[in-house]
């Protein structure tokens, strides 16, 4: 209700992140509701309290921007050193290796254990790719296979 004031013991009781806290207080302000934090002694119903809150908000935004810049700089430095992010590709994502694995499997003279050791993969990966190859499907991370259009290749 307008002219009411929400009182909390500490700021972290109202929101976990500064962005969430600022959004919540903005919504309160739009409804005409004041805010008071007892521990930090912030009262947005006074001009001084509004100033302190806006300074906190600006500092939080500045910190987020610094973190974003540092993250981007770190990723660029890692790429410059030849590092790639993400999950490593399976040896069977190469068509030649997949064809070789399928040929060894259909040969029946080579045990599956030896095929797995030579390719450096796990049994589930091996069978997932074989099943996908037999049904013209491409395996995806969720464990399910997605249909492909062979005319595109």
Image (cartoon, helix red, strand yellow):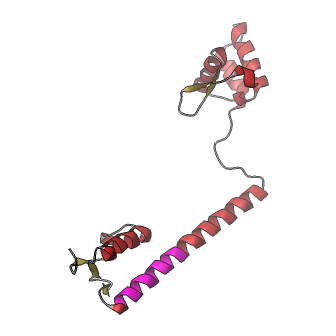
Residue 81 pos. (x, y %)? 78, 57
- Depth order, front residue of 103/33: 33
For the stretch drawn in magenta, the main secondary structure is helix
Q: Is residue 60 above or below residue 107?
A: below
Asked if residue 55 is among those painted magenta in the image, a careful observer would answer: yes
Residue 72 pos. (x, y %)? 66, 63
Residue 42 pos. (x, y %)? 32, 85
Name the quarter where the N terminus is drawn: bottom left
Look at 55% across and 76% down and name the residue there: 62
For the question of whether residue 109 can be seen, the reply is: no
Look at 69% across and 7% down and name the residue there: 108
Q: Hey, which residue is sitting farthest bottom in the picture?
A: 48
- Depth order, front residue of 113/68: 68
Would you say 113 lies left or right of 29 here? right
Look at 57% across and 24% down and name the residue there: 124
Q: Hey, which residue is sitting farthest top in the picture?
A: 108
Name the quarter where the C terminus is drawn: top right
For the question of whether residue 82 can be seen, the reply is: yes
Asked if residue 51 is among those painted magenta in the image, a careful observer would answer: yes
Residue 48 pos. (x, y %)? 36, 92
Disc count in the image? 0
Residue 135, by quadrant, is top right
Would you say 76 lies left or right of 33 here? right
Look at 72% across and 26% down and name the residue there: 119
The boundaries of the magenta stretch are: 48-62
Q: Is residue 61 above or below residue 120?
A: below
- Depth order, front residue of 105/12: 12
């Amino acid at each position: 209700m307008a002219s009411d004031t929400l009182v909390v013991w500490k700021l972290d009781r109202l929101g976990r992140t500064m962005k969430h806290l600022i959004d919540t207080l903005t919504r309160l302000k739009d409804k005409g509701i004041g805010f008071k934090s007892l521990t930090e002694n912030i009262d947005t119903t006074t001009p001084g309290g509004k100033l302190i809150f806006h300074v906190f908000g600006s500092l939080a935004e500045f910190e987020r921007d610094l973190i974003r810049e540092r993250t981007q700089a770190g990723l660029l430095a890692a790429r410059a050193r030849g590092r790639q992010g993400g999950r490593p590709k399976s040896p069977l994502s190469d068509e030649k290796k997949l064809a070789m694995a399928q040929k060894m499997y259909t040969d029946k003279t080579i045990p599956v254990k030896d095929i797995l050791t030579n390719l450096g993969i796990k049994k589930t990966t091996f069978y997932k790719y074989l099943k996908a190859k037999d049904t013209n499907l491409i395996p995806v991370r969720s464990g399910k296979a997605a249909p492909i259009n062979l005319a595109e290749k």
